[in-house]
Amino acid sequence: MRTSPQPTTTGTSVDRAEGDRIRRRVKLLVGITSRVGEYRDGLELAADRLTDHEATIIQDLERHGLDVPQLREVLWGGHVLVDDPDLYERWRFPTSRERLSSHHKTMDKSQYPDLGMKGPLVREKLHGRTRTGTWLQFEKTPAAMGHGFRLPTWTDFLHLCDFVVYRITKSNVGPWGLSKQTERWPMYLSPAISSSLPVSPAALGELTAALERIEDADDTTSASPDLARHFPPPDRASTTAELVFDPGTRNGRGMFGAVNIHVHTGQVQDARRALDRARGAAPPRWTLPPVADIGGTMTSTTSSADIPAETLENLVDLVGTGPVLLGAYTLAEIDAVGAIDHLFEEKPAPELIAEAVRSLAARGLISTDRGSDTLQVRGDLGIATAVQHRSRIAIDARVTGAEPDQPWRFVLMPQPEGITLEVLIDALGIHTYSLRGHEEALERLWKRLPSGGRGPEDADADALLGSSPRTALVTVNRWDESGGHTSTDLVLAQEGGDCHAFVRDDHSPDTLVATGKDENEWRRLIVQAAS
């Protein structure tokens, strides 16, 4: 009996669209990763033939903190441990098969057999259980080894050859290279290691006092300082409330680390001065090298270095599949590489910049090439710095009433390509960077601003700002190519079910006047000022 075809359900189309998005994102990640390092021929073609199951594995690894340098090791055959036992069953696909291996021999293989799967990118994916989670490894040559007797095949012989290479080089033989991250020296993602000690009473007072000083002094950037004074950072009863650890996030880690995906060689004068002073000084005895003091001024955002077209195209495509996280940095670290000179009211202290330079150097985020004296900003920070330097528009929003461990300030820097650099700033002055689609970035901003119905046109700004539990200052900054700066300010105050919107009086800029605009109207005002 013939049956008429059933219409495609919404859920199926959503699943298909999500699958396409994941495959596209993984292909882009593999493409970006393959630009650095040496790989066997055929990686680009394998990425084009990526299967849904392979994409799911890479996506799950990214969800557990995998970054681009680590993805390179995975493609080279690195041994990966993830403290998530659910991945063992999640990666059991219809094409999976039970396989014998020498990995993690202490596990009961009758209960948790090792599972293999072939694919164009992974060649041979092998995974199994550990006591606390799941292990994974990509291999160059699939093996037919399994339960029961069977004659060796040609691939078994090639697998044996790979084992000989492993014994000689002490490196795993992966589908696209060799990796030193073997089972003895594995890559560990999302470790379920809970080890914490209370801070000693002797150090606790000094630590909390330092946190309070940081909270009080770290707000030194604004294009509208006269209004910004009315929108200070949160003043917590306990500053330690800002230090909540969230195991479900990357906790300040970006996707690119210090890898040579993009190197920015623009304005890094403060870092250069700190390094020069440190090099010329006597061997330090736990002291900080001084650096020259520079007065903060509104300067041009023009930079001598821009993002290469290929890198920019890859980033735009990657943002189209989801946010690209670029890590978290202190104000002094950002200033050391010259990222936000155009927003400074007051520069961080020289000793803070010197210590920030040491921190960046220790993490490999600033470096020089061998034989060269040119200072470079690498990886996540290099990308974030270059995007800031090419920005001509910045939407800067300050919000009062933010919850502990949540950002209170939000800066959006839209780019002509339809992506936006989002910067979230908490009460300790930690700046968390990400690249997002422009519409997504705006929607995230709207959710953080006060909201409500239309306020009256005769509302008193001073009275409302003094009594409102939730207020915001939104400044849209614009710079021209010569460094000339203009700004537009919008002040919001929530009262009951209304949201009052104020702007500067055209004839008396120090005075705020009510606009009587509703939520959609004042949002359009921000968008128009930033367009």
Image: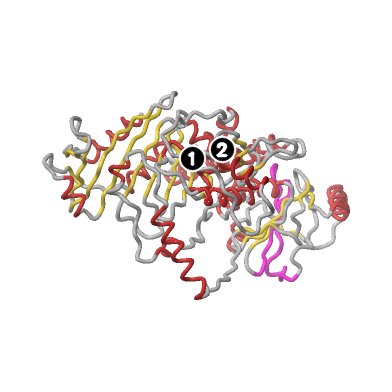
Magenta region, residue range: 106-131
Which scheme is used to colour this image of the protein?
secondary structure
Residue pictured at 40% horizontal, 46% vertical = 220
Residue type, mark 2 in image: Gln
Residue pictured at 68% horizontal, 69% vertical = 111
Total marks drawn? 2
Q: Given the current orientation, which residue lies at the most extreme left position?
A: 458
Label 1 close to label 2 by CB (< 8 Å):
yes
Q: Nearer the viewer, residue 219 or 149?
A: 219
The image quadrant of residue 31 is: top right
Q: Which residue is mark 1?
A: 294
Residue pictured at 86% horizontal, 51% vertical = 165
Q: Residue 269, labelled with which disc?
A: 2
Q: Nearer the viewer, residue 324 or 201?
A: 201
At which x and y percent is residue 217?
40, 53
State yes or no: residue 65 in magenta: no
Q: Is 199 situated above or below 9?
A: below
Q: Does residue 475 appear to the left or right of 206 in the view shown?
A: left
Q: Is residue 293 visible?
A: yes
Give whichever of discs 1 and 2 has the lower sequence position.
2
Residue type, mark 1 in image: Ile
Q: Nearer the viewer, residue 14 or 383?
A: 383
At which x and y percent is residue 55?
60, 46
Q: Residue 367, labelled with which disc?
A: none
Instruction: Name the element at disc 1.
Output: loop
At which x and y percent is residue 481?
44, 24
